[in-house]
Image (cartoon, rainbow, N blue to C red):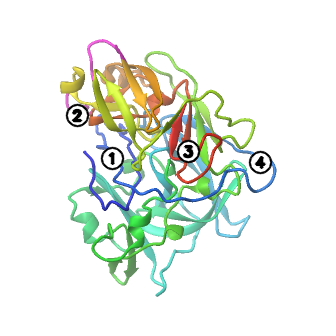
Amino acid sequence: MKMKFPALAHFPRLHFRFIPTPRGWALTPALLAAALLAGCGGNGTSGGGAVNNVQTISVNAGPAGNYVDGAFTSVKICAPGSTSNCQTISGVLVDTGSSGLRLLSTAVSLALPHQNDSANNPIGECLPFVSFFLWGPVETADIYLAGEKAGSAAVQIIGDSSFNAAPSSCTSSGTSQVSTLTDLGANGILGVGVFQHDCGPGCTVSGSSNPNIYFSCTGTSCTAVAEAEADQVQNPVGLFAQDNNGVLLKLPAIGPNGSAMASGTMIFGIGTQSNNALGSATVFTTDNQGDFTVRYNGQSYSSSYIDSGSNGDFFLDTSATGLPTCASPNDSFYCPSSTQNLTATNVGANGTTGTVNFSIANANDLFNTGNTALNDLGGVNSGSFDWGLAFFFGRNVFTAINGHNTGKGPGPFWAY
């Protein structure tokens, strides 16, 4: 189910479905809306010699202890310009389907300056999705990942009870607000996807065409406003002095029924240092929505994508796959009687193709193993393929940011 927004706006996917206690409840995915690429410049090589560009990630149960197929990392934030007034926050979900750092207010003890408009009113942000929305103030921080720094970056603070209540354009959607660790299953989301900005040019305009994402708040009311791209919550990788054109995620191969956990790395930059060369990886460019095509059983699905924030491979439905879903409350997941070995073909906007061999096991059986790293977990996503974290095991997956140059052309593209 794709959300509809103005053609000049793009939004993070945040396609994750976690299994909180009791297991079985799942967030419905929300697809990226129509986008216009916003060039960001940069080639990922400026800023001097090599720095530490390797960040550890771990697939585990997350800070709430109830996650499956979630890749988590730690993020250091500092008050802008300070090297001592800092905090390191663990349990942050790595999401190649969104852009920008978003942190639960309950996880942030550091006082950060609010982003204010020209009238000195604080800015809030509302990100609506099919089954939930995120609301909270936009604040400014220096973000440190490995040896890289995104200075004075906009960060969304989720669920700040001291900030204004969510405006009616959020609450009237009929969906619930995600604002706690129980809701989110993570202390935050690190969006390192194919877009630099979380909204793009659509949010820079005023009037009826504005998608009502950014708000100026005063007293008890908040009013939708235009937000310049430079002020939007952005992919922090694109703000690095170097290694700023994308990321490489590396997770080990795991066997059937998964693993108790898995350790991997997130390497910043593409072709900027000896450890992030594309090499023989195949490049799949995307359309202006960050999508490519997947061919399956003789049909083509053009609104498909790769997304580490999805905890499984979510694709089509029972009528298209022949795979039965689990009984409620796990009916977002597939539950075949035996593991099914399947094949699909990814097709980039540049015409490149690549065969994907993947397996789907019974989700209930997988959950009962107690393992948190699962490479054969899948579920329903009508009309398209969402290659989630299950796709990443045993592959080196590159995510190139729009408008940034690489040795094989500018992003946005996926490569593996």
Q: Nearer the viewer, mark 3 or mark 4?
A: 3
Residue 161 visible at all: no
**Residue depicted at 63% across the width and 44% down the height:** 406
Q: How far is disc 4 from disc 2 in space, using C-alphas?
A: 47 Å
In this rendered view, identify the residue nearer to me: 353 or 55: 353
> Do the residues under discs 1 and 4 have CB atoms within 8 angstroms?
no
Part of the protein shown in magenta: 326-342
Lower position in the chain sequence, tag 3 or tag 2: 2
Residue indicated by mark 3? 400
Q: Reading the chain from its start, which is encountered first: label 1 or label 4?
A: 1
Please check the rendered image and state whether residue 329 is part of the magenta-colored stretch, yes or no: yes
- Tell whether 53 sits left or right of 18: right
Of labels 1 and 3, earlier in sequence is 1
| Contact flag, marks 3 and 2 (Cβ < 8 Å) | no
* Residue 382 shows up from this direction: yes
Residue pointed to by mark 1: 31
- Image quarter in which the N terminus is found: top left
Q: Position of residue 387 (x, y in %)?
A: 41, 33
- What is the crowding at mark 1: few (fewer than 14 residues within 10 Å), some, or many (at least 20)? many
User: Of the residues shown, which amino acid type is indicated by label 1?
Assistant: Leu
Residue located beneath label 4 in the image: 51
Q: Amino acid at mark 2?
A: Pro
> Which residue is farthest bottom?
119
- Residue 144: percent from the left, percent from the top? 66, 55
State yes or no: residue 146 in magenta: no
Which residue sits furthest front? 351
Between marks 4 and 2 in the image, the one whose residue lies nearer the viewer? 4
**Helix, strand or loop status at disc 1:** loop
Q: Mark 2 or mark 4, which is nearer the start of the sequence?
A: 4
Structural distance between the alpha carbons of marks 3 and 2:
36 Å
Label 2: which residue? 329
